[in-house]
Amino acid sequence: MRFMTLAFGSALVMAAPSAGAELLRPGEVAPAFVLKVVNADVAKVESFSMKQHVGAAPTSKKSAVLIAFSASFCEPCKAELLELEAMREELAKAEILVVAVGVDTDAEGVAKMERIARELKLSMPLLSDRYGIVSRRYRVDMLPALVAVGADGAVSSSRAGFEAGAAKALARSLLARSLHRARPR
């Protein structure tokens, strides 16, 4: 099992983007999904449904959902998660929900990702994409990957790979857009 995780991880991180498999782009409709929350005790929810927060008929309307794809074997992912966690409360005030999606495919990797979430003191929901369905639908071929989904359910921005401060910059641009929309004219 460990070999499968390492092989999947290496393929995911090292895969060169191909013409048909790039991360979802702005304007594309973000696929709906429901995933189990691994850190339910901290996040205070058992499962996460994209349709509940954004799209045509959300029950808990958000101005955006920021999805951070991560894995236990990805060191840059930890740094990105820390950047996002540092901004989580500020984003929440602007109705922007941050979730992390762990792409580990075996029980050991999922458990390790849960330990990492505790060590990093993450309060955002950590979702388990153990079968890789969500990461395939979002065309994640490099980690870390970030996808911002607007209230309308369309991707507003996305990026793959790690650069210090990039997650924070993307989150700040979401905040600016959210505040701009909230201002009376």
Image (cartoon, grey):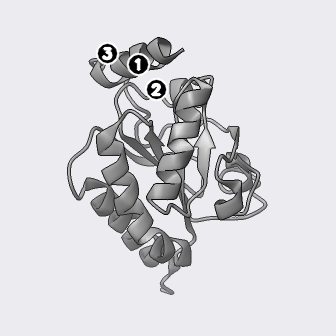
| 3 or 1: tag closer to the N-terminus | 1
Q: Is residue 66 visible?
A: no
Q: Is residue 32 above or below residue 10?
A: below
| 2 or 1: tag closer to the N-terminus | 1
Q: In the image, residue 8 lies at what x, y percent?
A: 44, 17
Check disc 1 and report its element: helix, strand or loop: helix
Using the image as rendered, state which of residue 24 and residue 107 is in the foreground: 107
Name the residue tied to disc 1. 6
Choose mark 2 or mark 1, whichever is in front: 1
Residue 134 as seen in the image, left or right of residue 174:
right
Type of amino acid at the residue the image marks with label 1: Leu
3 and 1 marks in contact (CB < 8 Å):
no
Q: Is residue 117 visible?
A: yes
Choose mark 3 or mark 1, whichever is in front: 1
Name the residue tied to disc 3. 18
Q: In the image, residue 93 lies at what x, y percent?
A: 54, 78
Type of amino acid at the residue the image marks with label 3: Ser
Q: In the image, residue 52 lies at what x, y percent?
A: 74, 54
Residue 30 as seen in the image, left or right of residue 51:
left
Q: Is residue 116 above or below residue 30?
A: below
- The numbered mark at residue 139 is 2
Say few, some or many: other residues with alpha carbon within 10 Å of mark 2 (under 14 / 14 to 19 / 20 or more).
some
